[in-house]
Image: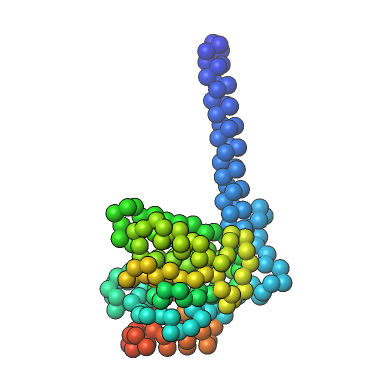
Amino acid sequence: MKPKTKKIIITLSAFFVVSTVIVTAVVLKNLNGNNVNGDGTFDPGDRYESTLMDYMGVVYDDRNDIYTFTGGYSETAACPWGAVHPGIDYALLNDSTVIAAVPGQVIDIMVQDYGESAENRFMIHVVIRFNLSLTVDYAFEPWTNITANKDHQVELLDIEEGDWVQKGDKIATFLKAGISAHIHFMVHENNVIQCPHKYLGAADYTELMEMIHSFQPTWDLCYH
Ligand SMILES: [Zn+2]
């Protein structure tokens, strides 16, 4: 082996070792970031019953805080709002209280920025893990282009990553900065966004449908 070739091989070997360390570190960070332990478990202890989610609630504590309803969950454009829409839009008045729909641990708070030219520029995500397979994702859309408004909504969050919440706990005050502000609410099971219906408690489903029908008397929650 020529010295030069040997040097290249050593360099390549070092590169792969470093790469492996980096990749491993990233994977571990992601697992920890999702509060799934290294052995793939997630244990809320005796905080709540985590086997089955069939007692999900709504995200508001006062129905009067909802100012309109324009979109539920749809996998098809053949629905009243005419578009595929993976989530439920809770259109909240300014200063409304936002509550936890499920108990769990806050595993991620993250801001998406769609760029300076976007009218609805920011989505502030709050993700709560209920168990190993189920998370809920609140996407706060204050409907603004102004960075200070985004920062204000972040300041109005009452939770931090790592916090545990019970169903009904206040997690935020809502900032309605623009005309179409709302929370786009998603339920993920095994990383697929689902219709929330089967997870809702009976009284919670009744409450949600009464709210929807107060604005849209004939609409369903989900269209498949
Ligand atoms: Zn939406």
Q: Residue at the far top: name it.
A: 2
In the rendered picture of this protein, how many numbered marks are placed on residues?
A: 0
Q: Residue at the far right: name it.
A: 46
- Residue at image point 55% right, 70% down: 171
Residue 114, percent across and down? 35, 55
- Residue at image point 51% right, 84% down: 204
Question: On the rendered image, what quadrant is the N terminus found in?
Answer: top right
Q: Nearer the viewer, residue 53 or 161?
A: 161
Q: Is residue 97 visible?
A: yes
- Residue at image point 58% right, 27% down: 14
Q: Nearer the viewer, residue 111 or 174?
A: 174
Residue 215, percent across and down? 34, 85
Q: Is residue 224 visible?
A: no
Does 111 sit above or below residue 129?
A: above
Does 189 sit above or below residue 24?
A: below
Residue 12, percent across and down? 54, 25
Residue 26 found in image quarter? top right
Tell whether 207 sits left or right of 73.
right
Figure colour scheme: rainbow
Residue 45 found in image quarter? bottom right
Tell whether 188 sits left or right of 144.
right
Residue 217 found in image quarter? bottom left
Question: On the rendered image, what quadrant is the C terminus found in?
Answer: bottom left
Residue 7, percent across and down? 55, 17
Tell whether 90 sits left or right of 70.
right
Q: Nearer the viewer, residue 143 or 31?
A: 143
